[in-house]
Amino acid sequence: MNMPNDQSIQQPPSDSNLNLPTASPCASALGAIVQEFLPNLTTYSEFYRQVHRNPELSSLEAETAALVARHLLALDFKVHTQIGGHGVVGILKNGPGKTILTRAELDALPIREQTDLAYKSSKTMTDRYGNERPVMHACGHDMNMAALLAASALLHAARERWSGTLITLFQPDEEETGGARAMLNDGLYSKIPVPDVLLAQHVIPLAPPGKAAVQPGPVLVAADAINVRVTGGPCKGSLNPQICVDSIQLSTQILTHLPAYVRDTIASGEDATVACWGFHAGIPGIDYPAHADFLLDVKTRKEDVRQAALKLIEKKIRDECRAANAPKEPEFKYSVRAPLTSNDKDTTERVQAAFEAFFGAGAVPVPRNSACEDFPLLAGERDVPYTYWFFGGCQAAEGGEVPTNHSPFFAPEIETALKAGTEAMALAVLAFVGK
Ligand SMILES: [Zn+2]
């Protein structure tokens, strides 16, 4: 295994930094607490292996939730279960001060694992739609959970050194981006204190192994879903209606042109992407279908670009239908799959300072990516400020490629990733509650 060679992780901070004012705890003093109270990570690497071997699909995370709850109870957290499905929340009240909510995800993906790890998953399960599926923690939520539990243990052990309330939230159904909303709809903030700050992190190969990457502003894309119905049928006065406006042909023509049109029409550098995620038309052998339905996935990195892209897509589809003489205007149903994840400036600069003091040069900006998240929804109507960051722990496989999240080969290096995720989460919490 290839461990990072950065002395800044090992450097003990100077003692003179240990008793600074509560308002803005010195970043290197926070690092000292993390180093002093870092738990033995064996328990949490075991947790990781156990959950990796036994992953559960979105909304079906019963065993994972029960295991997480047991760990939190063992740490004397007050535990709520079954919020918005299998959501679990642990609360550690530790005197006056800020309330910090930290979040990890419970669910795995319908992917057949292709690693040859001793703890690989060979599991299948029936998904919520009734289909038998392979299951794998191919996004690393098992690592995010292990790191949050280890950070909780660290903060519990170090409770004399900080003051405030720590909330650890384990969210179900992140992959289909329904879990955060489900927890809110289930009255999350009537059951637990409303936080002052939200924190979340994700293991990702794009971040340097053993380090954390954070920055203010947009870090994950917004994802919109558009359900489109294109109607075909006879032209006026036609005696041969089937072949006048073919809804399938018209839809495939639209889908062929749309991605390049959106890419080329949006100003360069402000990328917006559109992809077709589903297509349905007709029943084989019955008749020419009157309409074709397709699902578009639109990803953007800025709110004004998002608005422009959605308008542009609708206009382009309307224009193509009119040009083809379609007998009816196309229909559109919009839904937000995931909002833009855009880190609050002040909150994030505080986290960033703690990371830079601890991880040194490894605390790098967030790499550009096209992932999305429902985490910002937990800010609720109160608009609680949040910071979301990445931590690294993935090494290149044979051939030099690093399998990325959602790959059947995805395999973080447990010790490297777990240590970085534990340290980063504990540091970020302490940045707001440290004495
Ligand atoms: Zn994920």
Image (spheres, rainbow, N blue to C red):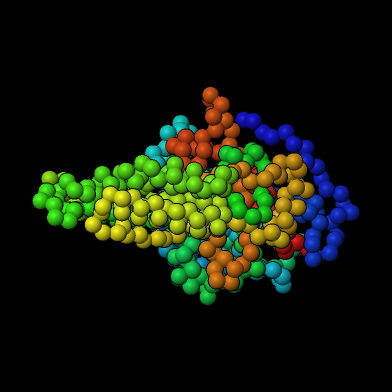
The image quadrant that residue 79 belongs to is bottom right
Residue 291 image offset from top left, x and y in percent: 23, 54
Foreground of the two, 144 or 257: 257
Q: Residue at x 35, y 55 (%)?
A: 318
Does 15 appear above or below 112? below
Outermost residue, bottom side: 190
Residue 59 image offset from top left, x and y in percent: 40, 57
Residue 305 can be seen in this image: yes
Foreground of the two, 50 or 167: 167
Does 207 appear above or below 182? above
Outermost residue, front side: 237
Does 9 appear above or below 399? below
The image quadrant that residue 257 belongs to is top left
Does 67 appear above or below 252? below
Residue 359 image offset from top left, x and y in percent: 73, 44
Q: Residue at x 80, y 51 (%)?
A: 28
Residue 183 image offset from top left, x and y in percent: 47, 66
